[in-house]
């Protein structure tokens, strides 16, 4: 009996949500990860429904800039996404990544299941053993993710850039 497109089993996609500073660069890192099928940049963890970029930048809404990742767990386990998350930013700086300062740039993992919560805490403990300062990353239940405005989606890709770079004074 031959295999047809309808009969092939596909892994159901899962969702992960991560805050690691400015979402443009974080999204680019996750988009390059094999097994990631889609990304959406947006705002999570705050009190205002449907905030705009301007609202979030005021620092009064409580939102973090996040990347919501849709991934195939048969191709990239959640633990590997956690490794991507830790490597993509400095989890020891509260409310700051590089030149970006504010609560919207905090480090956070928003878990979508009890299994993700356990994995996030275990991963954080492993990384704490690797860094010399306390990790400030929040691990909290996923809340509503409000997609950012269209011009923020795939921002770097639209501009032909692979990463966010900061000009040096050298």
Image: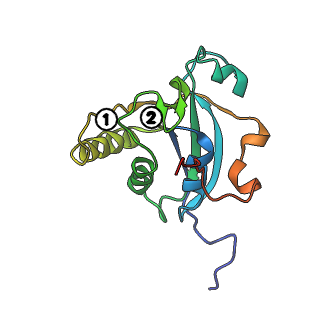
Which image quarter holds the N terminus?
Answer: bottom right
* Camera-side residue of 162 and 23: 162
Q: Is residue 127 visible?
A: yes
Q: In the displayed structure, does residue 31 sit left or right of residue 98?
A: right
Pinpoint residue 88: horizontal percent, then vertical percent: 46, 50
Q: Is residue 83 above or below residue 32?
A: above
Pinpoint residue 14: horizontal percent, then vertical percent: 53, 50
- Which numbered marker is on residue 107? 2
Labelled pair 1, 2 in contact (Cβ < 8 Å): yes
Pinpoint residue 89: horizontal percent, then vertical percent: 44, 45
Measuring 30% from the left and 41% from the top, which residue is drawn there?
124
Measuring 71% from the left and 56% from the top, which residue is drawn there?
157
Q: Gap between marks 1 and 2, in whole Å?
A: 9 Å
- Which numbered marker is on residue 135? 1
Q: Residue furthest front?
A: 170
Q: Residues within 10 Å of mark 2 (few under 14, many from 20)?
A: many
Q: Residues within 10 Å of mark 1 (few under 14, many from 20)?
A: some
Report helix, strand or loop for mark 2.
Answer: strand
Measuring 75% from the left and 54% from the top, which residue is drawn there?
159
């Amino acid at each position: 009996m031959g295999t047809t497109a309808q009969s092939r089993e596909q892994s159901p996609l899962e969702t992960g949500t991560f805050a690691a500073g400015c979402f443009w660069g974080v999204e680019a890192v996750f988009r390059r990860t094999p097994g990631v099928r889609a990304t959406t940049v947006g705002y999570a963890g705050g009190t205002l429904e449907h905030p705009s970029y301007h609202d979030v930048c005021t620092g009064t809404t409580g939102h973090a800039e996040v990347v919501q990742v849709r991934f195939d767990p048969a191709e990239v386990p959640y633990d590997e996404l956690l490794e991507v998350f830790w490597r993509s930013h400095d989890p020891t700086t509260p409310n700051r990544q590089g030149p970006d300062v504010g609560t919207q740039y905090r480090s956070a993992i928003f878990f979508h299941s009890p299994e993700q919560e356990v994995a996030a805490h275990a991963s954080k403990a492993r990384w704490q053993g690797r860094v010399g300062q306390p990790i400030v990353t929040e691990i909290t239940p996923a809340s509503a993710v409000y997609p950012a405005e269209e011009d923020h989606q795939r921002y770097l890709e639209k501009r032909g850039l692979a990463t966010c770079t900061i000009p040096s004074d050298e």
